Amino acid sequence: MPDRQAKSPVESFPMRVLVRSNNPIRLGFLQALLRDAGIESVLLDQHISAVEGGIGAFPRRLAVRDEDAAAAERILRDAGEDDGL
């Protein structure tokens, strides 16, 4: 019997990237806005950003499920955080 591991949200659902940023504080704020609205999000590329030493060559990406993308964009726009959408 094959060893099966639980899939992460990125593997389980089609995702849409909403924002690319090198600012971890802004990304944390955006995640909090989405979480408060009941929308799950995931930060992509966090590990490579840490490995590259913070020089900004690899921005982190904030992604949500495709089905939540329109609502997430609306929430970020309403909060004045639509830069990069």
Image (cartoon, grey):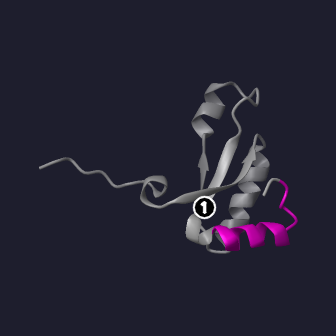
Q: Main secondary structure of the magenta part?
A: helix
| Residue lying at 69% horizontally and 74% vertically, measured from the top left | 71
Q: Position of residue 50 (x, y in %)?
A: 64, 31
| Residue lying at 69% horizontally and 59% vertically, measured from the top left | 31
Amino acid bearing label 1? Val
Establish if 25 lies above or below 45: below
Left or right: where 80 falls relative to 31: right
Q: Position of residue 32 (x, y in %)?
A: 70, 63
Most extreme residue toward the right is 80
Residue range in magenta is 69-83
Find out whether residue 65 is within the magenta segment.
no
Find out whether residue 81 is within the magenta segment.
yes
Residue ID for mark 1: 64
Establish if 53 lies above or below 30: above
**Element type where label 1 sits in the image:** strand
Residue 60 appears in the picture as rendered: yes
| Residue lying at 68% horizontally and 42% vertically, measured from the top left | 60
Left or right: where 48 falls relative to 8: right
Question: Residue 30's image quarter?
Answer: bottom right
Q: Where is the C terminus found, in terms of image quarters? A: bottom right
| Residue lying at 47% horizontally and 58% vertically, measured from the top left | 9
Question: Residue 51's image quarter?
Answer: top right
Q: Position of residue 65 (x, y in %)?
A: 56, 64
Q: Which of 71 and 35 lies nearest the eye of the viewer?
A: 71
Q: Position of residue 11 (x, y in %)?
A: 43, 53
